[in-house]
Amino acid sequence: MALSGKYGRLDIPRIGTDEPIFILRAQDRLAEPAIEMYRQLAASHGCEIATALQKEIDSFRQWQGSKKLPD
């Protein structure tokens, strides 16, 4: 389980019951640039996750659903 302020309790493996999480969705117009900024921060700190984040950015770009500003 994990705890999201917007979505409530979510069952996500390896995340503690009361650990707060923040979710970015592909429909959010600001999600892709936010992930890109996080990727750049991770890369500047030598984190290996930077490569995997590029794959996530690409999947957000390829998503064909409608996009909107966050609510």
Image (cartoon, rainbow, N blue to C red):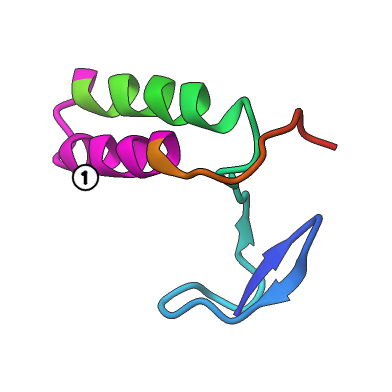
3 to the left or right of 64: right
The residue shown at (44%, 80%) is 13
Q: Relative to residue 26, is residue 41 depicted above or below?
A: above
The structure residue drawn at horizontal position 49% and vertical position 72%, both measured from the top left corner, is 15
Residue occupied by mark 1: 52
Q: Is residue 52 above or below residue 9?
A: above
Q: Is residue 32 left or right of residue 19?
A: left
The crowd level at tag 1 (other Cα within 10 Å; few <14, some 14-19, many 20+) is: few
Give the image location of residue 10, x and y in percent.
65, 76
Q: Is residue 53 magenta?
A: yes
Instruction: Determine the image quadrant of residue 61.
Output: top left
Residue 1 is covered by the magenta coloring:
no
Which residue is at a point 21% across and 45% down the rendered structure image?
52
- Magenta stretch: dominant SS? helix
Task: Relative to 32, say whether 8 is above or below.
Answer: below
Q: Residue at x 77, y 34 (%)?
A: 70
The magenta-colored residue range is: 44-61
Horizontal side of residue 24 vs 46, given as left or right: right
Amino acid type at mark 1: Ala
Name the one closer to the observer, 17 or 39: 39
Give whichever of 11, 44 is nearer the camera.
Answer: 11
The secondary structure type at the circle numbered 1 is helix
Residue 17, percent from left and from top: 62, 78
Looking at the rendered image, the quarter that the N terminus falls into is bottom right
Residue 62 position within the rendered picture, expressed as x and y whole percent measured from the top left: 39, 39
Residue 71, percent from left and from top: 85, 37
